[in-house]
Image (spheres, rainbow, N blue to C red):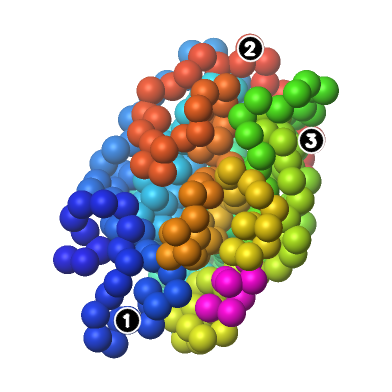
Amino acid sequence: QALMGRGEMVRSLPLFLSSWTRYRSLPKLAREPLSRRWQDVRTPGATIKAAFYAGCMIEYAYPEIGEAVAVALRKRGVDVSLASARGCCGYPALSAGDEESARRAAIDTLQALQRVGSDYVITACPTCSKALREEYPRLFASDPHWWGLANRIAQQSYDFSEFLVRVLEEPLPEDAAPVAGRAGYHDPCHLRHGLGVADEPRQLVAGAGYQLVELEGSDTCCGCAGLFSVKFPEVSQVMLQRKVESIVRAGVDVVATDCPACIMQIRGGLDKRGSAVKVFHTAQILAVEGAAVPSTDQSVEKPLPRRSRVRRAPTR
């Protein structure tokens, strides 16, 4: 019950759960998951069809990120549908050594993506992206029944910021005075060190009108790291405190990142400190581009006007 109800954050949990909120607040579960809030709106004249795979954190804690992805893609002329898988991508199980559970989760995800049928698969969670692109082909390397589909999905999969810059060829920001405020970017570990994506989200944030400030230690872990923060809360706390201090020293209004787990960790640490700095997914910043700073529970279901031209990138 503590994870539901009013307000946006849980600042204290009882008994054996108290270590989870000793150094950070936690998000409340969304009143409705993304799969219930999603509006399947067709994009007139779209030349690209994409499937969006949300993963568990966006589905149940941050559905507004999924809605922002839909708006950002549709305004750029992409026809996007939600791939409704029943659960997790399987990466947490895999990292815990439970390969059989990971395979079951992977099969469910692959079937959901196959049902949608698309040119590209988009994720807004680098861990899910890493699972789709690297772990699924490995999991089914000796299983001819699933390997073909796993390999095809891997080739189609992109993380959100990577897709906008490398496939849609989002233009570089113009040389204009920033109007939206000062923003820092935190590099999720799986995005920068796992997938090699670093410049693309910074380009997008700057293009949305922010003065981009490079955070000290921007590419160091925030301390969440999936199950790590649960198994080693004391170490996670030290890592988060360093991240929060670097953000406060930078004097930014907003922190952008592309990972819902990093959002949970950093937003929770800043909230616990009483900081007014906001933390958003890059998709949320783009979905309200040219408007005020998005709300932490921004509902962005109605698509905005699309861009007139979409280019296909060469096959990766």
Q: Residues within 10 Å of mark 3 (few under 14, many from 20)?
A: few
Q: Where in the figure is residue 82, as x and y percent of width and height?
A: 41, 40
Q: Tell which circle, 3 or 1, labels the residue nearer the N-terminal end.
A: 1
**Residue type beneath disc 1:** Ser
Say whether residue 194 is visible.
Answer: no
Compute the Cα span from label 2 to label 1.
51 Å
Q: Main secondary structure of the magenta part?
A: helix
- Image quadrant where one finds the C terminus: top right
Q: Answer with left or right where residue 188 lies relative to residue 111.
A: right
- Residue visible at 24% across and 46% down in the picture: 32
Residue placed under numbered mark 1 in the picture: 18
| Res 292 seen here | yes
User: Mark 2, residues whose alpha carbon is within 10 Å: few (<14), some, or many (≥20)?
Assistant: few
Residue that mark 3 sits on: 314
Q: Earlier in the sequence, mark 2 or mark 1?
A: 1
Q: Position of residue 97 (x, y in %)?
A: 52, 85
- Of badges 3 and 1, the one in the foreground is 1
Magenta stretch, residue numbers: 237-243
Between 181 and 49, the one lying in front of the other is 181
The mark found on residue 255 in the picture is none
Residue at 29% x, 38% y: name it.
37
Query: Which sits in the foreground, 58 or 122?
Result: 58
Q: Give the label, 2 or 1, closer to the camera.
A: 1
* Local SS, label 2: loop
Q: Which residue is most to the right?
A: 175
Residue 130, percent from left and from top = 62, 61
Residue wearing tag 2: 308
Quick one: SS at disc 3? loop
Q: Amino acid at mark 2?
A: Ser
Q: Is residue 181 above or below residue 10?
A: above
- Answer few, some or many: residues within 10 Å of disc 1's Cα (few below 14, many 20 plus, some between 14 and 19): few
Please check the rendered image and state whether residue 281 is part of the magenta-colored stretch, yes or no.
no
